[in-house]
Amino acid sequence: MKQSPAFLWRKQTDDKKLLGKTGVILSWTEISVAPPKFASSTPYTVVLVEFASGERTYGQLVDFQETDRVIGAKVSAVYRRYGVVAKEDLIEYGIKFKPSLCTQ
């Protein structure tokens, strides 16, 4: 499903609030069967993250070793490209998470 440029812009404006925040993994799952937009990335890991403020969100875990994918591990929010798009489509970016060395 294609999104309008205005919708994507508004979503990315909200994403900026999370950029650089650190949190801990509450839960994770590995996706083996994905929608066409993400099919070339399978399998991939999605994590539920809780920030110090108590706010929770989910996103893909990137740049990790298997030992980083544990409940309680610290992660940082980063901005990355989402999925594969056709040549004439808008490239969508959003929040993903990577292992963090900093303390929360």
Image (tube, grey):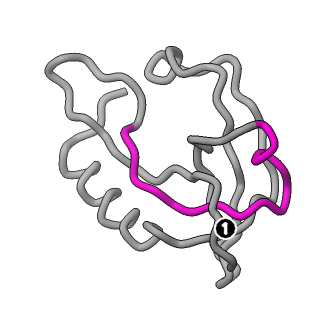
Give, as a single range, the part of the protein colored magenta: 66-81
Q: Please give the count of numbered marks on the rendered protein.
A: 1
Is the N terminus in the top left, top right, bottom left or bottom right quadrant? top left
- Residue at 57 percent across and 53 percent down: it is 97
Mark 1, secondary structure of its residue: strand
Q: Position of residue 60 (x, y in %)?
A: 59, 43
Q: Position of residue 7 (x, y in %)?
A: 27, 50
Which of the 4 quarters of the picture holds residue 61?
A: top right
- Residue at 76 percent across and 48 percent down: it is 68
Q: Is residue 11 left or right of residue 86?
A: right
User: Is 76 part of what is drawn in magenta?
Assistant: yes
Residue type, mark 1 in image: Arg
Is 40 above or below relative to 50? above
State the residue in front, 56 or 19: 19
Q: Position of residue 30 (x, y in %)?
A: 74, 31
- Which residue ends up furthest to the front in the rendered image? 101
State the residue in front, 7 or 50: 50
Q: Is residue 100 left or right of residue 11?
A: right
Q: Position of residue 89 (x, y in %)?
A: 20, 26
State the residue in front, 62 or 101: 101
Q: Is residue 55 left or right of residue 37?
A: right
State the residue in front, 3 or 91: 91
Is the C terminus in the top left, top right, bottom left or bottom right quadrant? bottom right
- Which residue ends up furthest to the bottom in the rendered image? 53
- Residue at 34 percent across and 57 percent down: it is 11
Residue that carries the numbered disc 1 in the rendered image = 56
Which of the 4 quarters of the picture holds residue 34?
A: top right
Q: Residues within 10 Å of mark 1 (few under 14, many from 20)?
A: some
- Residue at 57 percent across and 63 percent down: it is 76
- Which residue ends up furthest to the left in the rendered image? 88
Is 79 above or below relative to 45? below
